[in-house]
Image: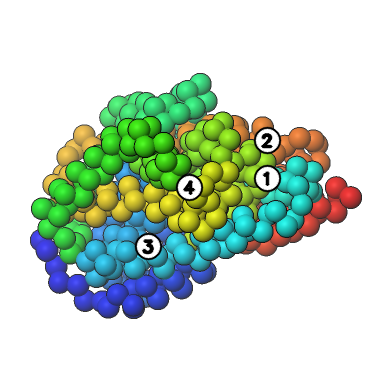
Amino acid sequence: MKQVPNRSIPEIFLIFLGLGISSFGGPVAHLGYFRREFVEKRKWLTEQAYSDLVSLCQFLPGPASSQVGIALGLSRGAIPGAVAAWLGFTLPSALLLVLFGLGLPFLGEIHGNGWLHGLKVVSVAVVAQAIWIMAKPIARDSLRMAIVLASAATATLFPSSAGQICAIAGGGLAGLALPGASILPHSPLRTAVGRTTGTALLSLFFILLLALPFLATESGSYGIRLFASFYRAGAMVFGGGHVVLPLLQSQVVPSGWVSNDSFLAGYGAAQAVPGPLFTFSAYLGAVSSGSPSGWVGAGIALVAIFLPSFLLVVGILPFWEELRRIEALQKAMPGINAAVVGLLLAAFYNPVWKTAILSGTDFFMAAAVFLLLTFGKVPPWLMVIFTAAIAEALSR
């Protein structure tokens, strides 16, 4: 049912801007920040409604934490509220990463700079921690572990969006056989859009997905090719930030838009900033070799990679009450979650591990960072600075 918004757009923007500035630690941590802010502190929704929303966003392709933020902004301020929530949560990290990318030419050659290699080493520890956190509650029996390994093998052998979709679909089918699967409890979610608007946005999602590759080929425009590549990445990747890494790498490195060293240096820098990891796209657009690049390229890439999530979340929420009652869908979700862990495991091997761990020293640094992040609860941004400084000192 359509609800009347009850929060001003500037207020929504400022709330999410505060979260965008302070939310370190990746998507799992972001969902924790959101829960404290909107369930415990502001009481925008109940615990049960929040759990329903998180489940929906984990099922959709794209960054789950950003999608939850978009949905929360939508529920309080309609579509302008959703845009305000996305801007507030996204802009801080996007601006920092673009500034980092534009400053790279003044920092010397990418290859051989010790501190930049240190950023790659940090990325190994961060992805390892993400696997550790996600796997503990999800891969808790032999069948779920088998789904994880099968998904990782599929993504490794077929490193493309098609391989990821096959892994997710296989995980969902296997999830139907998992014991103890049950329907999520009912808790209605507020929405400020109707089904007509939802249908139009979902239709636009699929129209763009099908039409953009054709337009990119026929137009010959680099800007359209850039938009099409990042839109496809945002539309086809399940599992959020770290899982998008191999798909983005396959889009921008073989094409020569971004060198592999620059790609991994930027990914390492992304660990030092708050907010969603998908803002890494702004860095890639800024440092790309085509035209437009810089601020314009960053804007194109950033909007393109988040647009699918916006269209899907806003489009599907009016139908969520009916969808959540489908028993097969609910039973498939544990298998889908296990498949996501497998995709993350595949991304950990290639390109993160293969391109960052080049010596025994790299291995021990990555292991130390992992232990400090996971068990010492040291903030990721502090480990990024510390490891980059050590790597730079060792390279001299």
Residue position for label 1: 120
Residue at 62% across, 57% down: 102
Q: Amino acid at mark 1?
A: Lys
Query: Residues at badges 3 and 2 in contact (C-beta under 8 Å)?
Result: no
Which residue corresponds to the image point at 35% horizontal and 55% vertical from the top-left? Answer: 67
N-terminal of the two: label 4 or label 3?
A: 3
Amino acid type for the residue under numbered disc 2: Thr
The one of 378 and 102 positioned closer to us in this rendering: 102
Specify whether residue 272 is in view. no
Nearer the observer, 168 or 284:
284
In contact (CB < 8 Å): disc 2 and disc 1:
yes
Residue that lies at the very extreme toward the right in this rendered image: 396
Q: Residues within 10 Å of mark 3 (few under 14, many from 20)?
A: many
The three-letter code of the residue at mark 4 reads Gly
Quarter of the image for residue 386 reads bottom right
Q: Residue at x 25, y 39 (%)?
A: 206
Residue designated by label 4 = 241
The image quarter in which residue 177 lies: top left
Which amino acid type is marked by label 3? Trp
Q: Nearer the N terminus, badge 4 or badge 2?
A: 4
Callout 3 secondary element: helix
Q: Which residue is mark 3?
A: 86
Q: What secondary structure is found at the residue carrying circle 1?
A: helix
Query: Which numbered disc flags the more N-terminal residue, 3 or 2?
Result: 3
**Distance Cα–Cα, label 1 vs label 3:** 28 Å
Which structural element holds mark 2?
helix
First reached walking from the N terminus: tag 1 or tag 4 = 1
Mark-to-mark CA distance, 2 and 1? 8 Å
